[in-house]
Image: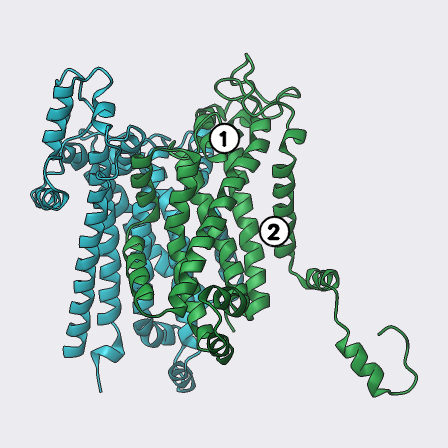
Chain colours: A green, B cyan
Amino acid sequence: MKKPVQTYSAISESTNFHERRSLWHRIKLAARKSPYTARFGVVVIVLYVLVALFAPLLAPYGEAEVFPAAYEPWSSTYIFGTDQIGRDIFSRMIYGARNTVGIAVATTVLSFLIGGSLGLAAAIDRRWIDQILSRSVDVLMAIPSLIFALVLLSIFGSTVLNLIIIIAILDATRVFRLTRSVAINVVVMDYVEAARLRGEGISWIMRREILPNILPPLIAEFGLRFCFVFLTIAALSFLGVGIQPPTADWGSMVRENANLLQFAQYDLRSGLTPLLPAAAIALLTVAVNFVVDWFLHKTSGLRDEQ
Amino acid sequence: MHPVLGTVLQRLGLGLLTLIAVSIIIFTSIEMLPGDFGQVVLGQAATKDTVAAFRLELGLDKPPHLRYFDWIIGVFQGDLGTSFSGRAASGQDRSREVADLIGPRLQNTLFLGGITALISVPLALALGITTALYRNSIYDRSVNAATLTTISFPEFFVAYILILFLSSLTQWLPSLANVDSDTPLAERLHRIVLPVLTLTLVIIAHMMRMTRAAIINLLASPYIQMARLSGASQTEIIIKHALPNAWAPIATVIAFNLAYLVVGVVVVEVVFVYPGIGQLMVDAVTTRDIPVVQGCALIFAVTYILLNLIADVIGIITNPRLLHPK
């Protein structure tokens, strides 16, 4: 309502009604109605992204810069102390945001590219493509993905590229299942049939007819899959077969500094050091879960219970 | 009982096919190694003859499908091949049988997993049923909030927090679970308190939430409303009317989580230095000892598939609609 209307006018009401809200306005409206958990989640995610982008500016020392003082306690020079070979833990935490989160995002994007496109293809062509893909996905999903990842890493070796490809392929099976099951309901719609009769190719139908209509569940799934991939990579790095030193990574940092825990009764702050990277992982997972929860509520009206 | 039997047999057949496919995948992993891996395993100093003898021992001169049958027959006889480690360039062979390496460790892992299952399954069921009974009470909300947090934490975070508070600061419990075959049972139980507690916290959340959701879902159905109108008490409704129909989803989620335990055990064993099969597998991956990796992966995968299969079968045979066909 821009100006007060004295008398009733159908035109003014209908023009007001049709006024399209700008994207920014809609975001502001959604934010005002969002629950505190979702706001908290968004703030945390934005913070992580900023830290990851500006890591070299924020970190006081280099990623693998070694100082002569190993296991230094918390001080003003080394905020969270130094690790077993004398690297500044605070700086490595900041670079870890870039490496750990960056690799997890790259893996999730790759798994969505693979799983999403194969899932769409299977939904459109229900004959042999669907049969072959679905049966092989069934078999792949029968093995726990951490165990499968361990087998593949032992064969191909633990490099970052191998890690990304292996986890992305294993995770793509879940994306494939979801994409296929949502897309199957859209494929039978009349407008898809019309596009097909018009002579559009499979790629056009996938991108322009089906994808826009199955986007909300896929976006929510992206958040959940990101959490899963993030935790898997952190677990593998923690086990020593994921991201390799000297790359700063939260999972391996927990393992490297775990010894400090036994000194907690003498110096509590040193004892907390190995928990910091683990807490960083947990915080991001919780934040993403909060946002996904809210997004699901908004897009599908999904409720926990009546 | 015919329809039930048919469905169960169909599921078992599918499970068998999956097992065969998975065993082929795990077997193929040795095929994907680069051609010169004999040199890598035996070291740079290995002569051509030693490498050739090593390849002959692995049977690399035979076609893959014959080797697969040799391997799978060996697996059924408890022979998982010979470890890559302990081999020298000179051809001297101090390597150990994979089955001997895995055997005692598998017992340890089963002990850990078994104790965890004994504690977590009844606890999760009790929590799930009571939270459904007292829905939206403070008790329900606090249990829900607590489980939501443990779901999003990585296992090692939970483990180290427990170590910090229960072991490092207070010295109540040992932080290392290094048992061997001579450790007496009481001592063994005392040492695995923290690993069991970690695993319980990690898997209980999901089981409890699914139990609660399954029961609450049923409470909205017409036959429950009928029971309520006939004057049945809340406890009676849940125990007598809702639970029989909820067994299938609950059994599925319990088996799923016990299967998840198979994976969670790897990280927890490494944190607490527990000599189980998970730690063995991680060590083997680091040294790229493929036969050991294959053996462990096979055990993990078969356990996982069998647990899921059992869940499916329980789901089918407890389904009242299938049991009493019209």
The C terminus of chain B - image quarter: bottom left
Q: Residues within 10 Å of mark 2 (few under 14, many from 20)?
A: many
Mark 2 vs 1, N-terminal side:
2
Specify the quadrant of the image occupied by residue B52. Answer: top left
Q: Looking at the image, which residue sits at the far front?
A: A199
Per the image, label 2 sits on a secondary structure element best described as: helix
In this view of the protein, can residue B314 be seen by the observer? yes
Badge 2 and badge 1 both on one subunit:
yes
Residue designated by label 1:
A274
| Circle 2 or circle 1, nearest the eye | 2
Instruction: Give percent across and percent down for residue B204.
Output: 38, 53
* Residue drawn at x 45%, y 31% as measured from the top left: A252
Which amino acid is tagged 1?
Pro
Which chain hosts label 1? A
Q: Is residue A294 left or right of residue B272?
A: right
Which amino acid is tagged 2?
Gly
Residue designated by label 2:
A41
Q: Is residue A238 left or right of residue A219?
A: left
Specify the quadrant of the image occupied by residue A180. Answer: bottom left
Which chain hosts label 2? A
Q: Pick the residue in front: A305 or B77.
A: B77
Q: Is residue B318 left or right of residue A205?
A: left
